Amino acid sequence: MAEQQENVVYVGNKPPMNYVLAAITQLNSGAQQVAIKARGRAISRAVDVAEIVRRRFVPDAQIKDVKIFTEELQNEEGGKVNVSCIEIYLARQ
């Protein structure tokens, strides 16, 4: 199944409001949906971002889908490490 082109905000170590602003900008520029993606320790920050966008800035946005999965990455020593991932899809009603 081919995935459609989507607006994505990758959440990392910056303050949550940086990602909130990015998501709001995409929603206000005509995007029907924005994906908030994070791995590892940034997962809780991604959830915060989605909730702040939804509750404080874009009240007509709703959580359309949430996907959780595990990615296998290689560390510096060459070994494999499992990292948890989340994708939160926000869409305007």
Image (cartoon, helix red, strand yellow):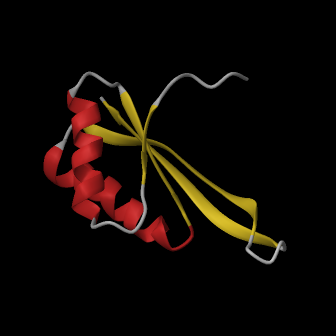
Residue 84 image-quadrant placement: bottom right
Is residue 46 depicted above or below 80 in this figure?
Answer: above
- In the image: residue 22, left or right of residue 85: left
* Residue 11 x/y as whole percent: 42, 57
Tell which of 66 and 22 is nearer to you. 22
Quadrant containing the N terminus in the rendered view: top right
76 and 3: which one is in front?
Answer: 76
Residue drawn 41% across the image and 60% down it: 46
Q: Residue at x 34, y 53 (%)?
A: 50
> Which residue is located at x 32 percent, y 25 percent?
31
Q: Which residue is at the far left?
A: 56
In this picture, residue 37 sits left or right of residue 9: right
Looking at the picture, how far across and down is residue 22, in whole percent?
Answer: 27, 44
Q: Is residue 93 depicted above or below 24 in this figure? A: above
- Position of 75 with respect to 43 (left or right) is right
Q: Is residue 84 above or below residue 51?
A: below
Residue 67, given in percent of the width and then of the height, sits at 59, 50
Quarter of the image that includes the C terminus: top left
Q: Residue furthest bottom?
A: 77
Instruction: Point out residue 35 in the picture as x, y percentages from the top left corner.
Output: 44, 41
Q: Nearer the viewer, residue 76 or 55?
A: 76
Towards the viewer: 93 or 27: 27
Residue drawn 25% across and 56% down?
A: 18
Outermost residue, right direction? 79
